[in-house]
C-alpha cells in the first residue's frame, strides 16, 4: 500500500541555519504530495503541495520539489527562524488511496535563538 | 470564513463509556474525513464521507467505532465501550473538491 517515510526527529538548529527534512514515498500511480505543519497548540495546516513530477511547492520560505525518479519530496528552507519551530508532516494523496491523506510520522523541529 | 470546527476540544472519559465526537466542516464542503493521531505519530485515516454517504470505513479499527453524516454536513464519530488504547487526538478534515483537505483543531480523547 501507499506509504510515506520521513526523517526522524527531533531536529534542533540555530536560527538562520539551513533546513532539510527528508521525505520519501511509495505509491501506485501519480500521487499528490504535501507538507503539513503543526505549530504548538494549533491544528494541522497545509504548508505546501505539489501535484505532479518536477513541480515545486513553496510557502513562507519553505520549498519542496516532487522528484518522481527518487520518489522524494524533501522540505528545505534557507534560513530558519525561531517561529518555524513546529512538527512537520510529509503526506500524500492518490487516486488509489481514495483521496485519503497518508501521513509520515512527523519531524519535530526546534530552532534556537 | 469559518474553518472546520470540532467539539469537544478535550474529552476525558472512563473506560467502558461511550463518547461522541462532533465535526462541523467548512460550509459547502462535499467530503469529510476522520483521522486518528497517536502521540508522536502522524494522523491515520479512519473513514470518509461524500455528502451523507460513507464511502470508505476501512480505517475504523473495530466495530466499536462508527461514524455518520446524516444530512451531508455535520458528522459524528462514536466510540462505544471505550478502552484506554482509544486515547488519541481525533482529527476531522473537509474539502470541496480536488485534494486539499482543511483540518479542524482536533478532539483530544483520554480514556482513564
Image (cartoon, rainbow, N blue to C red):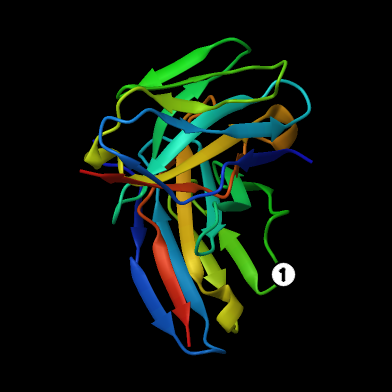
Give above or below for A9 relative to A100. below
Instruction: Place residue A93 in its image quadrant.
Output: top right
- Compared across the picture, whether A77 is left or right of B50 comes to left
Instruction: Place residue A25 in its image quadrant.
Output: top right
Give above or below for A57 relative to B34. above
Q: Please name whichever residue, A78 or B15, is drawn nearer the observer in this view of the structure.
A: A78
Which residue, as the protein is rendered here, is positioned at the far top?
A: A54
**Residue appearing at x 67%, y 29% in the figure:** A94
Residue placed under numbered mark 1 in the picture: B62
Residue B82 seen in the current view: no
**Residue appearing at x 62%, y 65% in the figure:** B66
Q: Please name whichever residue, B38 or B108, is drawn nearer the observer in this view of the structure.
A: B38
Residue B5 seen in the current view: yes
**Residue appearing at x 30%, y 32% in the figure:** A80
**Residue appearing at x 46%, y 45% in the figure:** B93
Which element is circle 1 on?
loop
- Compared across the picture, whether A17 is left or right of B1 comes to right
The crowd level at tag 1 (other Cα within 10 Å; few <14, some 14-19, many 20+) is few
- Compared across the picture, whether B49 is left or right of B30 comes to right
Which residue, as the protein is rendered here, is positioned at the far left?
A: A113
Q: Chain of mark 1?
A: B
Give above or below for B58 relative to A56. below
Amino acid at each position: 500500500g501507499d506509504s510515506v517515510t520521513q526523517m526522524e526527529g527531533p531536529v534542533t538548529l540555530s536560527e538562520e541555519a539551513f533546513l532539510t527534512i527528508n521525505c520519501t514515498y511509495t505509491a501506485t500511480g501519480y500521487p499528490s504530495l504535501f507538507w503539513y505543519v503543526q505549530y504548538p497548540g494549533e491544528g494541522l495546516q497545509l504548508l505546501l503541495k505539489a501535484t505532479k513530477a518536477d513541480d515545486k511547492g513553496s510557502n513562507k520560505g519553505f520549498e519542496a520539489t516532487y522528484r518522481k525518479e527518487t520518489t522524494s519530496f524533501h522540505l528545505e528552507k534557507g534560513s530558519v527562524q525561531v517561529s518555524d519551530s513546529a512538527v512537520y508532516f510529509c503526506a500524500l494523496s492518490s487516486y488509489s488511496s481514495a483521496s485519503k491523506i497518508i501521513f509520515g510520522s512527523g519531524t519535530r523541529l526546534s530552532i534556537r535563538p | 470564513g469559518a474553518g472546520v470546527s470540532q467539539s469537544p476540544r478535550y474529552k476525558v472519559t472512563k473506560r467502558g463509556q461511550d463518547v461522541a465526537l462532533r465535526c462541523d466542516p467548512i460550509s459547502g464542503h462535499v467530503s469529510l474525513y476522520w483521522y486518528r493521531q497517536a502521540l508522536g505519530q502522524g494522523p491515520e485515516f479512519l473513514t470518509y464521507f461524500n455528502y451523507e454517504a460513507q464511502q470508505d470505513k476501512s480505517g475504523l479499527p473495530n466495530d466499536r467505532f462508527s461514524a455518520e453524516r446524516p444530512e451531508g454536513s455535520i458528522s459524528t464519530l462514536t466510540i462505544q465501550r471505550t478502552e484506554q488504547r482509544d486515547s488519541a487526538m481525533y482529527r476531522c478534515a473537509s474539502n470541496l473538491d480536488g485534494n486539499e483537505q482543511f483540518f479542524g483543531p482536533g478532539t483530544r480523547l483520554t480514556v482513564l
